[in-house]
Amino acid sequence: MDKKLFQQFYKMEESHWWFEGRRKIVRYFLKKFLKDKIKPDILDVGCGTGFNLINFSDIGEVFGAETSAIALEYLEKRGLKEKVFFTDLPDLQIPKIFDCITCLDVLEHVADDETALSNLRKYLNAEGVILITVPAYQRLWSRHDEAAHHVRRYSREELVKKIKKAGFKIEYLTYFNTFLFLPEAVFRFLKIGGKSGSDLFKFGKFFNFILSLIFSSELFFLKITPFPFGLSILCVAKK
């Protein structure tokens, strides 16, 4: 991922509508599928600049895995470096087993994602849970994907096939970021991008609040039924 994107993430991930909306949805499913665990050990693979390690700390004991030296600089600024394993996908090497692994918009960066999924499974205990999010639809490929060094975007069918091949049992799967699908698709087709081609625009507080409210409101419906389309896919699977 480009250095400028790490800088953007560090500055924006606490309050930007996209990060905030995704985080609320992920938190709900983490709590739902870990409700029987007392202080579970959680590994956030590809933890980036580390805000999720802070945000998820009320759910369990959270560790990170990261390979970027640039990201480690920001993790150190947040005082999180000691909780992060410096290791890479697909060749993850960690001296610990976890109750849960989160892999949030990470697999699309990995050339050999099938091996990565198989290796992640090794670091879950017998009842372990993995929560994955990935960008959806290859036809929505844009300059943002290039700036983020993505290898692919996923269809539901492709993700399901690879997760099952790695030996996981899927518990829940849905598209999400659905309510904003149309404007975002238009942005991508028109090749509109922010800094370094990224989709991460900095909005004013009011507009950012509205977008966050729209995105976060999806959770009400996701508690009832999965979505049939969206800009991203979320999957919860068990070992």
Image: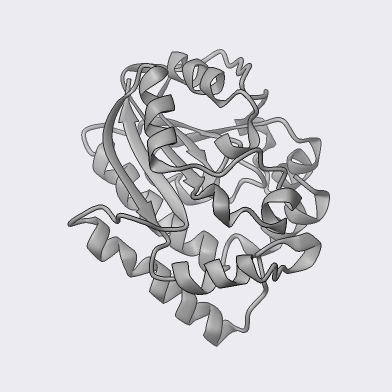
Q: Is residue 213 above or below residue 218?
A: below
Q: Is residue 185 above or below residue 36?
A: below
Residue farthest bottom in this picture:
206
Residue 80 lies left or right of residue 233; in this view the side is right
Q: Quadrant of residue 40?
A: top left
For the C terminus, which image quadrant? top left
Residue 96 lies left or right of residue 2; in this view the side is left
For the image, the number of numbered tags is: 0
Q: Residue at x 59, y 38 (%)?
A: 108
x, y percent for residue 20: 49, 63
> 150 or 103: which is nearer to us?
150
x, y percent for residue 193: 71, 68
x, y percent for residue 147: 75, 52
Q: Quadrant of residue 129?
A: top left
Residue 63 lies left or right of residue 28; in this view the side is right
x, y percent for residue 135: 52, 49
